[in-house]
């Protein structure tokens, strides 16, 4: 009986040793921060656009663009709670869009502030465009971590014909924004 128990102990020790071996040649594993679910809390930050990604019907990335592109800086979204003129709490998103002026080569900043709301995994923003046109944008919060957020535009969906017309893979269907915190 002692030999059976000893054999089982050695066998289990060997299995766990093999399973825990760190000599796999890949170095330390990459550990991402945990996914957050308190969207109201963790969205309160300054977020820089990193990538625009096109996803297929299964939400796998099929095409990716650097969000900076030809602009001079990464565009920013700043989410915060503030007080309105009646001292009521309101949630606002301030957008900073940066465009390089072709005549002067200077980086121009454009700023817009708009309300936002979060309901479950949906982020809704209302933007008053030039000419007083109200635009409402709907996003699915695909993923939120302490320092990274993935948003899928719910009001933007490509057909196969549109994807090909724009030079994207024909599988491209959804637009996703990848943002990272700056602070």
Image: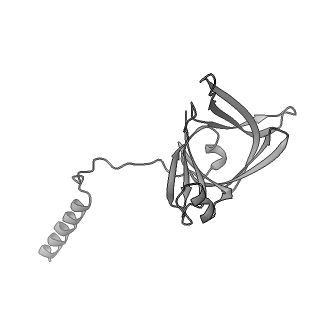
Q: In this view, does 163 lie above or below 30?
A: below
Q: Is residue 150 left or right of residue 90?
A: left
Q: Position of residue 172 (x, y in %)?
A: 56, 60
Q: Is residue 86 left or right of residue 142?
A: right
Nearer the observer, 31 or 177: 177
**The C terminus lies in which quarter of the figure?**
top right
Nearer the observer, 159 or 73: 159
Q: Which residue is drawn at 64% across and 27% down?
A: 101
Q: How is the image coloured?
A: one colour
Q: Where is residue 30 in the image (x, y as percent from the top left)?
A: 37, 48
Nearer the observer, 81 or 47: 47
Residue sitting farthest toward the left: 3
Q: Which residue is drawn at 74% across and 39% down?
A: 92
Q: In this view, does 183 lie above or below 23?
A: above
Q: In this view, does 14 lie to the left or right of 46?
A: left
Question: How many marks overall?
Answer: 0
Residue sitting farthest toward the right: 86
**The N terminus lies in which quarter of the figure?**
bottom left
Q: Position of residue 23 (x, y in %)?
A: 21, 52
Q: In this view, does 31 lie above or below 174?
A: above
Residue sitting farthest toward the bottom: 1
Q: Position of residue 8 (x, y in %)?
A: 19, 72
């Amino acid at each position: 009986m002692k030999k059976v128990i000893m054999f089982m102990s050695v066998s289990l020790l060997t299995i766990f040793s093999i399973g825990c071996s760190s000599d796999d040649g890949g170095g330390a594993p990459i550990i991402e921060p945990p996914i957050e679910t308190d969207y109201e809390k963790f969205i309160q930050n300054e977020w820089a656009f990193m990538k625009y990604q096109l996803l297929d019907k299964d939400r796998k990335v099929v095409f990716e663009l650097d969000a900076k592109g030809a602009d001079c800086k990464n565009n920013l979204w700043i989410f915060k709670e503030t007080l309105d003129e009646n001292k009521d709490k309101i949630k606002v998103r301030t957008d900073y869009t940066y465009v390089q002026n072709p005549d002067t080569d200077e980086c121009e900043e454009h700023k817009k502030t708009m309300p936002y709301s979060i309901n479950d995994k949906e982020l809704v923003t209302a933007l008053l465009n030039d000419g007083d046109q109200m635009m409402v944008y709907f996003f699915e919060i695909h993923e939120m971590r302490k320092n990274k957020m993935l948003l899928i535009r719910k009001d933007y969906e490509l057909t196969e014909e549109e994807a090909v017309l724009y030079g994207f893979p024909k599988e491209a269907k959804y637009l996703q924004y990848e943002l990272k915190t700056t602070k």
